[in-house]
Amino acid sequence: MNAEMDLVNFAVDEARSKGATYAEARYEKQDPENFILKNGVLDALYVGHDQGIGVRVLVNGALGFAATNSLSKAGVRAIVGDAIKIAKASRRKTKITFAQEDSIAMNWSIPEAKKLADVSVEEKIAEIQGVDRDVTQLGFKLAARYFNLSDNRIRKYFANSEGSRIESYSPRLRVFYFLTVVEGAGVEQSSRNYGWSGGWEGISTWGLSDRVVEEARSMHRSLTKGKKSPEGKMDLVAGPQVAGIASHESCGHPTEADRVLGREAAQAGKSFIPPDGLGMRVGSELVNVVDDPTVEHAIAYYLTDDEGVKARRRYLYKEGRVTEFLQNRETAAALHTHSNGAARAVNYNVEAIVRMANTFVEPKDHSLEELLEGVKHGVYMKSFMEWNIDDKRYNAKYAGREAYLVENGEVKHPVRNTIVELTTPAFWSAVDAVGKDLDFEAGFCGKSDPGQALDASMGGPPIRLRNVHLR
Amino acid sequence: MEEVASQIVDKAIALGCQDAVADVVENRSYQIRFAQNEAVISNQWRESTASVFVVHGKRVVASDLKDLSKTDEAVERLVKIAKTSQPNPDYAGIAKGSFRYARTRPDPKVLSLSEGGKYVEAAVGGALDQGAKECAGSFWKYEDEHFLATSNGVEGHDHRASLYLSIRALVSLESSGHGIACATKLSGFEPEKAGQKAGRIAVLARTPKPAKAGRYTVLFDPLIFGSLTDQVGGRLSAWAVLAGLSPFGKKIGKRVASPQLTLYDDGSADSIARKRFDAEGVPTRRNLLVSKGILKTYLHNTSTAKKFKTKTTGNAGLVYPDSHAIFVRPGDRSRDEIFSEVKDGLWLTNTWYTRYQSYVTGDLSTIPRDGIFHIRNGDVVEAWKDIRVTDNLIHLMKNIVALGKEPEQMMWWGEVSVPNFVPYALIKDVGITTSNQ
């Protein structure tokens, strides 16, 4: 990567010499590989070879960004010229500044016990075909099934005009599956997503075949034994998948500082939390929600962000109050604080913006059984299918995929399409107990324009909500 | 660049591939993102990518190559990987050329445009003049040039350029409006009008009241109706049908919408996504998808067409067929007339986050954003907030009772993925839910 590193350093120097008060450049080489096994047939294999350099400059208080995959001095000189020219043309009345951060020289990589590059396509396909075979052998009517196995090897080199020089390597592995089970006139659909930072060894940590088989069984159970979900106010035990999506949607997104400041207003929206909203109560005192890029092997693991700032754990909500926004250097300056290393870009050709990494409810001490024991009448919603939330992150809906009636602490029959449609404070204020067994799922988080669908994970232990309205 | 495309195809065939496609794309797009009424960043791209599709013994491999100086080595690597992959029995080849393409050319004034600040200022100014306080959005000059070659004798060149602006205007966190401007000619680009619309809706949406759940007659503004028709277009991809991601499976020849709805896909018509050919080189054309409510066809490439015993519709992507641009045949109502038909209902202006509980049944919900209005006897009586449309895609389409006569080109971040030419739509019996606590 030496030649590319020289080009990155050249880009930074060239930008400074052309009048940028701040400049950074990022080389990325990505080697993605993925395939879809649809109804037992390998649709197509995708093998990418992606690389290029992006340059961001600050000129007269305005930002310009340009990117190319022409890895030559002429190509890089051209985009530096572009970035400076378009920044100068911005005619901003207020000046953008960056929070002062330490410069870093670092070389980090995520270890792979079995390198992704050494795993053949045949082995990968065989792994997924094995899972497909196991689920079809159940004998259920599977109207459609598809599996997507993807991996990516991401090499980066970042440099800025303040002296940071960071090299990194992130191997990532992911499985997504989508099943359709039919029974009579009934249809049940489910999708799940698992992610790993590291080598091929990640595939065995998921117990994929067991999980998919159990999912299909639960879908069949819902169809054959499921009853109408009860309506009214009652208790809800939300499984890790539900706690995870809620922590991502109604804790992570509203604490993104760029959203709080209005930079995403026309796309991903704003936030119900105002810029001076730190300390605002949004949940019960048991609610701690964390975003942490340093969770080992989580899909969004990193040690430095794409502005060269060290990653660290962030408490978004602590004891039910908003405690920290996710910041990059631009938002941190606007809010008179420091970046907490949340700037990420999906590739070399887009700017780094404020993003979540691995977001989860911090575990406490209850087992699932203890959570259920305390429920006289309610629902255990283990997983969800449909979900959405408004653009200020206040009104969320989670529709149950696998859910059960709970009476006097006992799990009874499956219930179908349980609907939780609550405001963010209503959801988190109802939490009266938090479990101890943390589980994660992977996802893609969408934001920005051009859209950046970025690796993220979300999770939590099971949590219990008292007296919430369900449909 | 046409030499690079041909070289990739020739190399793949020389290595024993049965089919090969290379689409070398030069992207020279330019964007300004703005927020708080001024630019927050300007972006410029200079990228050349070869999208490659090779098939060896029915083993299909796709790729995007960025190092165009080493395409021979890259193709060798792809073919080697293809040999270790597995055959796709459903693969049925690519279209046979040669083809004649429409002589479309980008507007020279769009091509020469290198500074977009004044269009952002026009849009923001338009919104602020209406009383908005805060504006955010994006201005785009899209420009890409395609050089296509396939092993079936197709060679194509397509230079595409267009202008786009999306603006959201806010009076407060809960009072906002959205406007869109799309054009392939500079003379037809109206960012100020988009800003004015966004600002007008935002001001009208001041002091919104909590909503009441129920079933309503709803007037869908073109932007939100475009979200629904975009769902229809996307779910009509034959690939989506086969993957269990569509409510339109086994519904060819059946009623899927009200007789009011006639809808087609047309990549050849003037839109900001106009293209001469699809990924196999098949000339784009108009395909009638829904005629007076009856489903006519799915969107196909050569392989899915064979599986469904029909012909390609010219909608091939690199691997899967998809919509190019969706057109709804306009109705006969003026804006005033269609508003006057709402005796007691809602007017929705935008939405996002459309998600399905079941793709097969079409059960979904989506969250309106920006102006939400309660209408009585054709007039806005108050603004509402915090609602969700909880319904079914086919039920919504079947309940269309009237369409406006003036379609607008809509495309928007995350929701309207391709241009949708849509008028106002009046739909009865729409499920509206709210947060229960």
Image (cartoon, coloured by chain):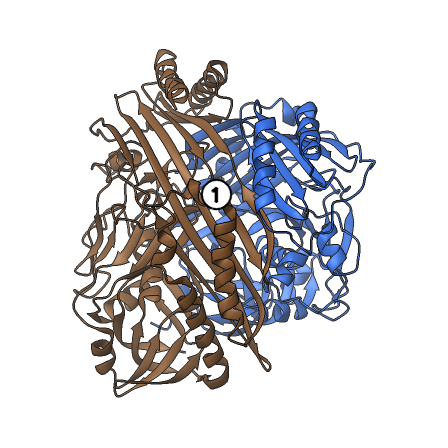
Q: Nearer the viewer, residue B17 or B229?
A: B17
Q: Can you say whether A441 is above or below B54 in the image?
A: below
Is B102 situated left or right of A283 in this image?
A: right
Extreme-top residue of the structure: A17
Is B227 situated left or right of B404 in this image?
A: left
Q: Position of residue B307 (x, y in %)?
A: 73, 59
- Among the 4 quarters of the image, the one containing residue A139: bottom right
Q: Position of residue A359 (x, y in %)?
A: 29, 54
The N terminus of chain A: image quadrant? top left
Q: Nearer the viewer, residue B377 or B208?
A: B208
- Among the 4 quarters of the image, the one containing residue B210: bottom left
Q: Can you say whether B386 is above or below B416 in the image?
A: below
Q: Where is residue B124 in the image (x, y as percent from the top left)?
A: 48, 37
Q: Nearer the viewer, residue A140 or A264?
A: A140
Label 1: state its secondary structure.
loop
State which chain is coloured brown: A
Let me know if residue A16 appears in the view. yes
Where does label 1 land, which residue? A451
Is B32 situated left or right of B302 in this image?
A: left
Let me know if residue B352 appears in the view. no
State which chain is coloured blue: B
